[in-house]
Each structure stands twice: as structure tokens, then as C-alpha cells.
Amino acid sequence: MNLWCMILLGLLSCSDAHMDFFTSIGHMTDLINTEKDLVTALKDYIIAEESKLEQIKKWANKLDQLTDTATKDPEEYLGHPINAFKLMKRLNTEWSELENLVLKDMSDGFISNLTIQRQYFPTDEDQTGAAKALLRLQDTYKLDANTISRGKLPGVKHESSLTADDCFELGKIAYSEADYYHTELWMEQALRQLDDGEEAAIDKVSVLDYLSYAVYQQGDLNKALLLTKNLLQLDPEHQRANGNLKYFQYIMSKEDNQSNSSSMEESQPEQGSKTKRKGRPEDYLSERKKYEKLCRGEGIKMTPRRQKRLFCRYYSGNKSSWYILAPVKQEDEWDSPRIVRFHDIISDEEIAKIKELAKPRLRRATVHDPQTGKLTTAKYRVSKSAWLSSYEHPVIEHINQRIQELTGLDVSTAEELQIANYGIGGQYEPHFDFGRKDEPDAFKSLGTGNRIATWLFYMSDVTAGGATVFPEVGAAVWPRKGTAVFWYNLFKSGEGDYSTRHAACPVLVGNKWVSNKWIHERGQEFRRPCSLSEQD
């Protein structure tokens, strides 16, 4: 079986999951191997094509000499019957053979196989999703465009940078979303790199065209006018820029006339409108600033006095637990809601097996739509997930049993173990794990009640970003491979604990793997009995 067939079969095996590559680093690693195989085949193709070109060159040199002689006196040349015959033969037969040689794929169908494979490559959606992820990281972690473009990110091992063309592409994608704030940032970065002498396919005229309009859309008319004039210095015949120049001058003249005919108090807002900047687009998430501060490690609301009440201990679970003889290490992460972390609770071997089982099944993570009650994808959850049952492998059974022993809760009514891998800038914005009163049918189909508690394994370290944060209380929990965190989503009364609203921060650098177990109410009646007080 040739190399291309093997690549194709490998891609076909995951054809159902080839979409949304940007939502999972785990799936993107397959693309690295695919591209390596493509490069190997491309080198073979180049060698074969070079051999073909040598044959074509010999043919061209021979005909070059022949046609030089023939064109000096065509009639005398063709007066020789053999020359006339050979001309007919060449044009009718030999040139057709040359055409076939030129069009022939010399390396076992490289071009045709590449065409077939292209349908399994990342799509425009993937490229746009990856671009939006960079913009999201820029905002969340307060990174300027130059820092990202130069690849100066914390903890990176493989240096990489963006070209002026890359910056221009990011700006265009923001522009297509009417996000003029990021359009300006990235077009300015492209312009800086061009001014530094970087070679690029794009030119300053194209950059200034987008940049001037993005600045105008943000309300800075003076700067938009200046950029338009700079564009016209480079290309005086630019039709759109000439039109914009007249329009901008007209608006400024109109505002000046209004200011001259009004009192100073009335004109001041008009004057300000020339330089008023709209800034970052408004966000639907009211808690955005609080959430992003926690992601950066800022705004954590834990006073020294409260911190002193948090302890580490050896924990043996319930009375019948096998951990009585070998207790585990438990650490208090937060007091209210109480969040505890278990250390060294899952081994590297178990993690490797879980990832091996989950990776072929990873699909774009979904959320419950409160309007329809159905599962759907959402831009605020960028990851892929898979579900594993205990009967599939002893490792899953052992992990489920471990959770039951340490929490004291019955996991027979819990959901399957969910494995999640986050993609570029992977995140899950603030959400509740439990069903609220305004969505009473969230888990009706399961018949096991609401989600009483959450157990979350961290199956990888994350170089930068990727924290689990609780915006309502100002808590942040950072990923540490081999640990797990646990909290209750419901009070003993069965009421939802709204302080457990949490989020997975965007992954800035690294690869984040987690797995979680959502434990439900049914089966816990005697393990965690209801309280007589609604406040308990």
C-alpha cells in the first residue's frame, strides 16, 4: 500500500470528526503527522518532477535549434520532403506526447491524492475559529498585538511568530465580523512590520484601506482622515480612498459649522465626536471583566484571615472506604463554596489510557439550550469531549469507584465520565453545572434528578491560562496534572448554590485535558440527607 493510501485511510477513519479542528489540541496533533507525510510525499514529487523537467529541457533545446534553422527560410526548409513530413509528425504526434509528459503526475498520483485529501483538511471555519481564539486570548490576558505577533508568550518552548500577512489576515477576519476594534489593532501591527522592512504579499495600500475605515467606524475621524491621506500618497488614483477623503472632509466641515453656530456648551460634544473612540466591542456577558481578571490571577477574594482557615490533610473517605489504610492527600482550595483538591489521585498510566480511549471519539462539546432543552454547540464553549462508560475498560470502573469512596456519594446514577480537550484559546465561559428553576427539564430524560456535585480531574499541566474560576466568589483553581477538585452544586435542601457558577479560562499556552463526573441526586437520599433548613 503506497504512502498516500495509508494517509487517506487514516483520515477516513476520523472523517466524522474532521470538523472543528480548532476546538481540540488533541485532534490537531493528527494534522501535524498528516502534514509531515505530505511533506515527505512532496519531496518525492519534486525529485520526480525534476527528472521530468530534464527530459523536457532536452526536447526544448533540440527544437530550439531546429526552429531557428527552419524560420530563416521556411519555404526552402519545407522544400525538403523529409522536413515537411517530420513537421507533420511532430505537431500531430510528438507534441501530443510532450503534452502528456508535461501533464503526467510522476509520483504515484500526488496531485490527485492531494485533491482527495483536501476534503479532510481544516476548513474556513477552522481558520476563522483559530483567529478568533487569538483575539480572545489577546483580550483575556491583556496582550498587545506586537507581543502575540512576536510569539513572546509565557513558557513557550517552540518560538513562533506572525508575518505581516498573518496579521493582515487576522485584521480581515475581525473586519468581516464588524469588529473594528481588533481590525485596527492587527492592521496597525501589519503596518508596523511592513515599515520595518518585512517582505510580504500584501502592501501598505491594502492595509491602510482597511485601517482607515476601521478607525472611522470607531469614531476617530481625524485619524481616519490622516490615514486616508497617507494611502493616497502611495496610490493617488485609489478610487475608494478618494471617495472617503471627500466624505471625511465633508463630515468635519459640517461639524465645524455646527460648532461655530452653537454655544460652547452645545458644541463641545460635537467636537468630542471627532476623537471619541468606541474601544472594545460590548460583550453580552455582564461578568466579563470579573471573569477575565480571575483568569489573569487578579481579583481573587481571599483574605489572609480566611486563608488561615484552609488546611491540607490526609483523607480516608467514608468509614467503609479502602482509603482508611492508605489515605489520600486533600487540600482546601476555597471555603464557601467549599472546594477541595485531591492530590496524586490519578496516575499517568490511567491518564494515558483514558486519553487513548477518548481521543477517537472526541466531538465538539455541546451545551443545553434553555429554550429548546436540546444539546447544541456554542461559541462560549470551545473544546471537544467524549464520554466513557465503566464497562468499557477496568480503568474507568476503578476511577468511578474511587470517586464514590472519596465523596461518599453513589455514582451508579451519575453521568458517564466526560473527557474534554481544549483547543486554541479553549474555554468554557461562566455557567452552572446544575439545572436552574427556569429550566426544570434540563435532566428530565436521565430520570436521576439534578446534578448534586461535580468531580473534576486535571489530566495535564497547563503552561499558561486554563484556570477554573468562580466569578461570583472570586475563586481561582489552577490545573495540576494528577489532581482532582470536588464541590457540591446543591445545598442539602436541594436548592442550587449559585456561588458555584464557574468557568474554564482560555488556554494561553499548552494543552488542557480534563475529565469530570457529574453526580446526580438519586441514590444520595441516605448518603447526603436533606436538611430541615433551606439555608443549609
Image: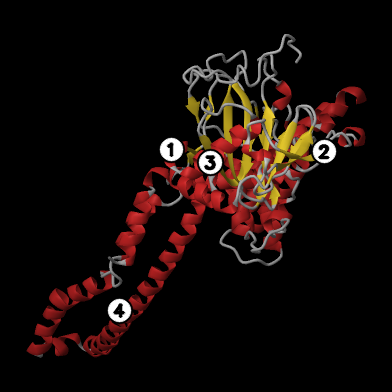
Rendered image quadrant of residue 68: bottom left
Above or below, 312 against 188 in this view is above
Q: Name which quarter of the figure residue 292 lies in.
A: top right
Using residue 389 as the reference point, say whether residue 299 is left or right of it.
Answer: right
Amino acid on which disc 1 is placed = Tyr
For the image, the number of numbered tags is 4
What amino acid is found at the position of numbered circle 3 in the picture? His
Quadrant where the image shows the C terminus: top right
Q: Please, what secondary structure does the residue beneath circle 2 have?
A: loop
- Local packing at callout 2 (Cα closer than 10 Å; few below 14, some 14-19, many 20+) is few
Q: How has the structure been colored for display? A: secondary structure
Inter-mark Cα distance, 2 to 1: 37 Å
Comes first in the chain, label 1 or label 4: 4
Classify mark 4: helix, strand or loop.
helix
What residue does disc 3 label? Answer: 398
Residue lying furthest left: 81
Q: Position of residue 524 (x, y in %)?
A: 60, 20
